[in-house]
Image (spheres, rainbow, N blue to C red):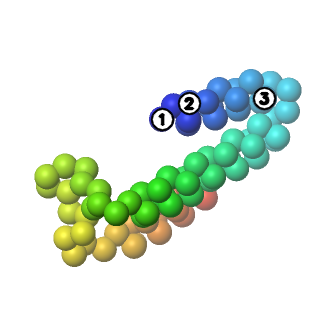
Amino acid sequence: MERVGRIEQSWAETRIHDPEVAFIEALMRLQLLQSALRTYLLSQKRKLLLNRKDPLGSGYDFTELDMMAEQLWKAT
């Protein structure tokens, strides 16, 4: 969340002078952060548990939900 906050702060400062550059830069930085986080989470040797009722790894398929989230992200 701290990184997202720094991206937002940079965007807020840059958009005053050049909104288009600010948008492109923020989008690129968020995509890089998302990719790095995904890589990190998938490379963990231990199973990541959010809590004891976490369905991750219990036969649930989030492919469709992930696709819908990606479509929403691209639309905004």
Check disc 2: other Cα within 10 Å, few if <14, some if 14-19, many if 20+.
few
Q: Is 16 positioned to the left or the right of 34 in the image?
A: right
**Residue at numbered disc 3:** 14
Q: Quadrant of residue 3?
A: top right
Please tell me which residue is depicted at 78% across the width and 29% down the height of the picture: 14
In this view, 72 is above or below 11: below
Check disc 3: other Cα within 10 Å, few if <14, some if 14-19, many if 20+.
some
Q: Secondary structure at mark 1?
A: loop
Tag 1: amino acid? Met
Q: N-terminal of the two: label 3 or label 1?
A: 1
Please tell me which residue is depicted at 39% across the width and 73% down the height of the picture: 63
Residue 60 rendering spot, x and y as whole percentages:
25, 72
Please tell me which residue is depicted at 14% across the width and 55% down the height of the picture: 53
Check disc 1: other Cα within 10 Å, few if <14, some if 14-19, many if 20+.
few
Label drawn at residue 1: 1
Q: CA distance from mark 1 to mark 2?
A: 6 Å
**Residue at numbered disc 2:** 5
Please tell me which residue is depicted at 63% across the width and 52% down the height of the picture: 32
Q: Is 58 positioned to the left or the right of 66 in the image?
A: left
Contact between labelled residues 2 and 1, with CB atoms less than 8 Å apart: yes
The single residue placed furthest to the right in the displayed view is: 17
Residue 31 rendering spot, x and y as whole percentages:
62, 53
